[in-house]
Image: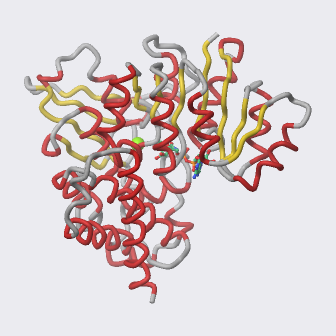
């Protein structure tokens, strides 16, 4: 039996992963499930999958979790250290699907096992790509990307010579405000931003899709994971989300990955790799779809794409600054403190401010240094939000 753990089990990726595992429950020995506020879901899944341990990120919910697991024989844990401990429990396959920079330390702990990490937590590559890849390299851990675009690129590269890659094109649906007039974006509400035209995902990544910060993160993720230069990465708006990414080779060929917008494909690919197994995803009827649409991204509408390029050009630990500023700006928008376009303004302010205070982004990339610069960037972002919120 394969031992599996899911970090971020109660979220959108976590629940899709559980869906696939529950369909073949006899094949898996579930070690650890982690969550945060949704104790009922965490306990229900831990009991159904007969996990060894369930852990919530919130210390104060330990008693609730214990109560919910009572009589099941399943261990309960709470807090950051308990999540890292759960990530370190021996497993053959671990899904990293916590949202945000909070996923970095547990992901690194999982990588130290030397087995396989399915990586949905894109923030860890954006914040600390080199550290993540070096940790994997040192322990001989295989990383399989679970972001749909990166799974698509990975699949298009199988059997190919990386030296023959000219460019990588990642597609973007354009999110909720693709067709809105740019000058109306300051009126966008939280509800409107939380509604994705094609994908059913967690709220944070859905809003990031509307602002294109999700794509900006994915460009950095591509640069880090596939070791291609920023100039080799293009973003293409493709409203139907059927083509997830394309790899362009030096003979002019483009290899596209086409499939329905369903994360269970990328998750299932990573779960069964190197085998391909039947997955419960829709089979596309291209004749019925008829045509696919593509547009160049308008950087006036989506400044996040320019900010991602500037972040990659600055290098060092600027990715951690970018991510922390983006997460804080997103919190500011969710809390109603800043409007939708102000999220990009806040990130731009923070990048400029931290780039000017030399030393930080050039520091050695260790977990402590990343967390420290993450903290500084969050403070700078709070100041930038405060300036706007009054
Ligand atoms: P989500 O918000 O639905 O779920 C997040 C999970 O993280 C939950 O289990 C939650 O309990 C846990 N969590 C939240 N804060 C935590 C903290 N401080 N410490 C520990 N755990 C915490 O998010 P999601 O949409 O499933 O996304 C998860 C990750 O996968 C993100 O990095 C996202 O960018 C990436 N991703 C998601 C999708 C998608 O379709 N949802 C697609 C591609 C990539
Ligand atoms: Mg994606």
Location of residue 151 (image quadrant)? top left
> Who's the residue at 35% across and 30% down the image?
152
Q: Quadrant of the C terminus?
A: bottom left
Q: 138 or 193, which lies in front?
A: 138
Q: Quadrant of the N terminus?
A: top right
Residue 132 in the figure: left or right of residue 193? left
Q: Position of residue 46 (x, y in %)?
A: 75, 32
Q: 76 or 235, which lies in front?
A: 76
- Please determine whether, in this image, residue 143 is positioned above or below residue 341: above
Q: Position of residue 350 (x, y in %)?
A: 31, 69
Which colour scheme appears in the figure? secondary structure
Location of residue 361 (image quadrant)? bottom left
> Who's the residue at 55% across and 46% down the image?
200
> Who's the residue at 33% across and 28% down the image?
257
- Please determine whether, in this image, residue 181 is positioned above or below residue 217: below
Q: 214 or 236, which lies in front?
A: 214
Residue lying furthest bottom: 390
């Amino acid at each position: 039996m394969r031992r599996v753990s899911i970090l971020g089990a109660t979220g959108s990726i976590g629940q899709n992963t559980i869906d696939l595992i529950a369909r073949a429950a006899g094949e898996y020995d579930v070690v650890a499930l982690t969550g945060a506020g949704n104790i009922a879901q965490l306990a229900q899944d831990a009991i159904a999958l007969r996990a060894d341990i369930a852990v919530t990120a919130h210390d104060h919910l330990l008693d609730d979790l214990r109560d919910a697991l009572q009589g099941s024989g399943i261990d309960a844990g709470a807090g950051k250290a308990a999540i890292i401990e759960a990530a370190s429990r021996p497993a053959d396959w671990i899904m990293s699907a916590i949202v945000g920079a909070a996923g970095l330390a547990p992901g690194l702990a999982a990588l130290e096992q030397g087995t396989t990490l399915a990586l949905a937590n894109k923030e860890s590559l954006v914040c600390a790509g080199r550290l993540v890849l070096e940790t994997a390299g040192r322990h001989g851990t295989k990383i399989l990307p679970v972001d749909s675009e990166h799974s698509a690129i990975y699949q298009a590269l199988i059997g190919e010579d990386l030296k023959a890659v000219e460019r990588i094109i990642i597609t973007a649906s354009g999110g909720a405000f693709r067709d809105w007039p740019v000058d109306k974006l300051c009126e966008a509400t939280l509800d409107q931003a939380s509604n994705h035209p094609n994908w059913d995902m967690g709220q944070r990544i859905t809003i990031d899709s509307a602002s294109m910060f999700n794509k900006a993160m994915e460009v950095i993720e591509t640069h880090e994971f596939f070791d291609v230069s920023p100039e080799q990465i293009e973003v293409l708006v493709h409203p139907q989300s059927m083509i997830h990414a394309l790899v362009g080779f030096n003979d002019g060929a483009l290899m596209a990955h086409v499939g329905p917008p369903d994360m269970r494909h990328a998750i299932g690919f990573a779960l069964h790799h190197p085998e391909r197994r039947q997955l419960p995803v829709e089979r596309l009827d291209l004749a019925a779809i008829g045509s696919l649409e593509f547009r160049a991204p308008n950087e006036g509408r989506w400044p996040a794409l320019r900010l991602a390029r500037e972040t990659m050009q600055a290098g060092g630990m600027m990715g951690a600054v970018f991510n922390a500023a983006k997460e804080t700006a997103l919190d500011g928008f969710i809390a109603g403190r800043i409007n939708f376009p102000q999220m990009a303004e806040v990130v731009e302010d923070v990048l400029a401010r931290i780039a000017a205070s030399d030393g930080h982004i050039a520091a050695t990339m260790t977990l402590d240094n990343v967390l420290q610069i993450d903290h500084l960037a969050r403070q700078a972002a709070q100041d930038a939000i405060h300036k706007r919120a009054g």
